[in-house]
Image (spheres, grey):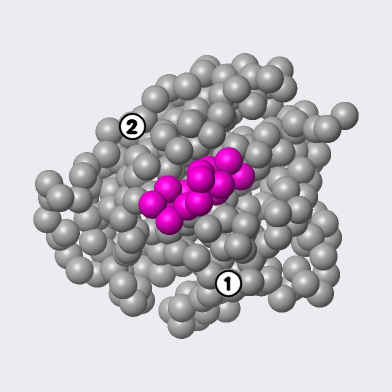
Amino acid sequence: MPPTRVAIIGAALDLGAGRRGVDMGPSAIRYAGLNERLEGAGIEVEDRGNVQAAIAETRDTGIESARFLDEILETCTRIAAEVESARADGLVPLVLGGDHSIAMGSLSGLAASGAGGVLWLDAHGDLNTPDTSPSGNVHGMPLAAALGLCDGFSRDGLRLPAVEPDRIALVGVRSLDPGEQALVRELGIAVYTISDLDRRGMQPVIDEALERVGGGSFVHVSVDMDVVDPEVAPGVGDPVRGGLSYREVHLALELVAEAGVLDALDLVEVNPIHDHENTTAGLAVELAASAFGVKIL
């Protein structure tokens, strides 16, 4: 069954990204009517506010291979605690980003009950490590960190690794760095590129992906809004042409809702600076509704 009680947790963090602005994502999504949309569908919503996050201008970047790492992990530790608390209270966490590095916190909080699986909707792999990252931007590393592959990411309050390689499915990918390609081949991680979706269609891919990510202690769905084509979602942190259509991304999350397996949801990388009239934040609201089982009839 889709969830009926949801805890909104904001993470106004942009330290992991190369372009500024995604720290305003949680506010933009709330402003687009998130609470009203879910409550109007009969879902009980408890907005727990934003976790504390550092501001780039007040901190040094730290090591260039993983910029602002300490500050990012501090924020992720707070997210993990909020996610764990929400689940203990019987609510499904909805974490609003912020850049995709926040998923380390979401997954760590879920892993309080053991390792699980994640459906990762993203134009990118987010499987770089400090050794392979071309940029040093940590938002390109959270999935590798969740696998326990990033040296120096261990912190009290974070459970890394949080997922297992055979319970990961990436969908909508159209940009992988060389180090990520090598890791996918080495670990046998399921990656469904945009070409796979073109050839096979969304429903068989999502059905197969959900079967793969199940069987652990949780199923997490992490949605980077750049999985959608920038013509539909222009306000994102790192746009890549050729993404999912409006209907394709809705269908993906409708299928998640129908499967009744969702334990937590991330919506990340909404960047109001690059958006048009809050279009991307509005789409994020619609996608949350689809993931939580809101239907036309």
State the residue at coordinates (79%, 60%): 202
Looking at the image, tell me whether mark 1 or mark 2 is earlier in sequence order.
2
Mark carried by residue 51: 2
Which residue, given by chain and number where applicable, does mark 1 sit on? 241
Assign the N terminus to one quadrant of the image.
top right
**Does the magenta portion include 275?**
yes
Q: CA distance from mark 1 to mark 2?
A: 32 Å
State the residue at coordinates (50%, 65%): 239
State the residue at coordinates (70%, 60%): 245
Query: What residue occupies the far right of the structure in this picture?
Result: 297
Marks counted in the figure total: 2
Magenta residues span 270-283
State the residue at coordinates (12%, 55%): 60
Assign the C terminus to one quadrant of the image.
top right
Q: Secondary structure at mark 2?
A: loop
Q: Position of residue 37 (x, y in %)?
A: 64, 27
Asked if residue 165 can be seen in this view, the reply is: no
- Looking at the rendered structure, the kind of residue marked 2 is Val
Left or right side of 39 for 31: left
Asked if residue 275 can be seen in this view, the reply is: yes
**Does the magenta portion include 48?**
no
Left or right side of 77 for 107: right
Q: Position of residue 274 (x, y in %)?
A: 43, 56
Q: Is residue 261 above or below residue 188?
A: above
